[in-house]
Image (cartoon, rainbow, N blue to C red):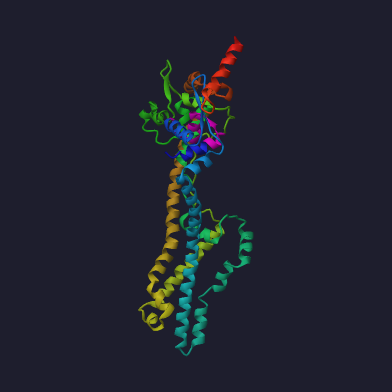
């Protein structure tokens, strides 16, 4: 069974000596899943179990456990190789859209130029017509965009910085830069785990609500049904006060392998707003401008190719472009339509995110101005708060050394005590 990558990352962040509660809170995983995953990782990566006198278990892993797994599993090696290959492939895919845009513009305007020259050569007033059509092309301005001076001059005007080159910026203009909340669920459970740990394993529902969505109808909120997934995930237990108030404590998250410094926790789970593009405004304008140049050129070319007589008489490049013209036109339209549609969709999506953030923020504010009833609940929850740190000295047995070697020192210490 291949170890869980999330558990591997949590073990590394926690210093290679962990409890089930440490990993569950750090990775935001179900306690049972974290327990099973740690057993698998310990079995496959030469990890060791340390048992305290209280019966609590600590997992100790070697710092090179990834190398041990890599040598054991061909699948992990292939995954690492594929990640490196995919980075290269994805970069080539990203820049291909910019390359296609430049190629499309070059092909369209070169074909127009060939057609214009051919038409003018058959007329007596070649110079006049050539001059008029020459004014249609803005090649000097277009080439200026790609000149070395443009980058400097444009940065001086916009004072914006971008990590993208032009070809990468074209992809960003078209498709954006991915979902900023792709790891929202992971963040949610990690924050909840931190809140529980910060309160020493005992909380009230109002402390967890700012990190949840869909709390249900008002009646469901009164009965705190939304806490059920939290109890299930972290193996929590409810308790009821004499006043009928519910509190929750989580024994597994009350045990840790080492003392931790308090972590900074956001008062509520904040979703990130979607951005149209991470490219600079200058790069976005350049991409849109070139898209417009490409589309206008495609429309002009279509009017020149209408009827097919010119393509038939000239052949060569013109005939080839005539065959793929509808692809060029579709690309030109799509290049501007996709970002426009995406912009409208982002505005709608962000309005929903803002509303959800506002709801979660309002729940967090209830804690800052807690009334008497809520303060009473929190005080009752603290009766179940506990924090147990299992140090190396607390270990009475470890799979790292032979059982007899551990028993003899224990007997000696007992005789000295007597």
Query: At 57% from the left edge and 32% from the top edge, which residue is drawn?
Result: 263
69 shown above or below 369: below
Query: How many numbered discs sit on the rendered protein?
Result: 0
Report x, y in % for residue 265.
54, 34
Considering depth in this image, is 315 or 364 the residue closer to the camera?
315
Q: Position of residue 395 (x, y in %)?
A: 55, 23
Q: Is residue 313 above or below residue 347?
A: below
**Residue 227 or residue 372, whichever sits in front:** 227
Q: Residue at x 50, y 60 (%)?
A: 95
**In what quadrant of the picture does the N terminus appear?**
top left
Q: Quadrant of the C terminus?
A: top right
Residues shaded magenta: 11-31
Q: Residue at x 59, y 15 (%)?
A: 412
Q: Residue furthest bottom?
A: 124
Residue 166 in sight from this viewpoint: yes
User: Is residue 203 visible to us here?
Assistant: no
Viewer-side residue, 62 vs 349:
62
Residue 74 placed where, x, y %?
Answer: 46, 46
21 drawn magenta? yes
In the image, residue 273 lies at what x, y percent? 49, 46
Question: Up-down: is 123 above or below 288?
Answer: below
At x 50%, y 18%, the residue is 383
Image quarter of residue 311: bottom left
Decide which of 104, 161 is in the foreground and name it: 104
| Magenta stretch contains residue 114 | no
């Amino acid at each position: 069974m291949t170890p869980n990558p999330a558990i591997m990352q949590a073990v590394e962040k926690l210093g290679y000596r962990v409890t089930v509660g440490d990993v569950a809170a750090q990775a935001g995983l179900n306690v049972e899943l974290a327990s099973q995953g740690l057993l698998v990782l310990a079995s496959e990566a030469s990890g060791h179990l340390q048992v305290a006198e209280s019966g609590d278990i600590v997992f100790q892993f070697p710092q090179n456990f990834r190398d041990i797994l890599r040598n054991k599993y061909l699948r992990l090696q292939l995954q690492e190789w594929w990640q490196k290959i995919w980075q290269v492939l994805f970069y080539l895919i990203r820049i291909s859209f910019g390359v296609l845009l430049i190629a499309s513009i070059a092909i369209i305007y070169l074909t127009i130029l060939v057609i214009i020259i051919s038409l003018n050569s058959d007329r007596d007033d070649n110079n006049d017509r050539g001059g008029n059509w020459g004014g249609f092309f803005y090649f000097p301005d277009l080439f200026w965009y790609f000149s070395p001076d443009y980058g400097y001059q444009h940065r001086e005007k916009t004072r914006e910085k971008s990590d993208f080159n032009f070809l990468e910026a074209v992809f960003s203009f078209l498709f954006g830069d991915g979902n900023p909340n792709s790891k929202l669920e992971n963040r949610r459970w990690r924050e909840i785990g931190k809140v529980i740990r910060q309160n020493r394993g005992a909380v009230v529902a109002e402390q967890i609500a700012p990190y949840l969505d869909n709390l249900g109808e008002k009646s469901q909120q009164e009965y705190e049904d939304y806490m059920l997934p939290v109890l299930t995930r972290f193996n929590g237990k409810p308790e009821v006060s004499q006043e009928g108030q519910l509190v929750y404590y989580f024994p597994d998250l009350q045990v840790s392998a080492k003392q931790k410094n308090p972590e900074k926790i956001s008062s509520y789970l904040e979703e990130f707003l979607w951005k149209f593009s991470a490219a600079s405004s200058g790069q976005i304008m350049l991409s849109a401008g070139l898209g417009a140049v490409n589309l206008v050129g495609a429309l002009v070319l279509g009017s020149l190719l209408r009827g097919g007589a010119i393509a038939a008489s000239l052949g060569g490049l013109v005939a080839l472009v005539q065959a793929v013209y509808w692809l060029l036109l579709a690309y030109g339209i799509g290049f501007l339509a996709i970002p426009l549609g995406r912009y409208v969709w982002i505005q709608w999506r962000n309005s929903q995110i803002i509303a959800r953030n506002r709801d979660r923020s309002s729940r967090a504010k209830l804690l800052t101005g807690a009334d008497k009833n809520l303060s009473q609940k929190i005080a009752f929850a603290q009766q179940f708060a506990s924090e147990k740190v299992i140090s190396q000295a607390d270990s009475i047995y470890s799979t790292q050394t032979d059982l007899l070697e551990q028993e003899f020192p224990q007997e000696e210490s007992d005789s000295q005590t007597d």
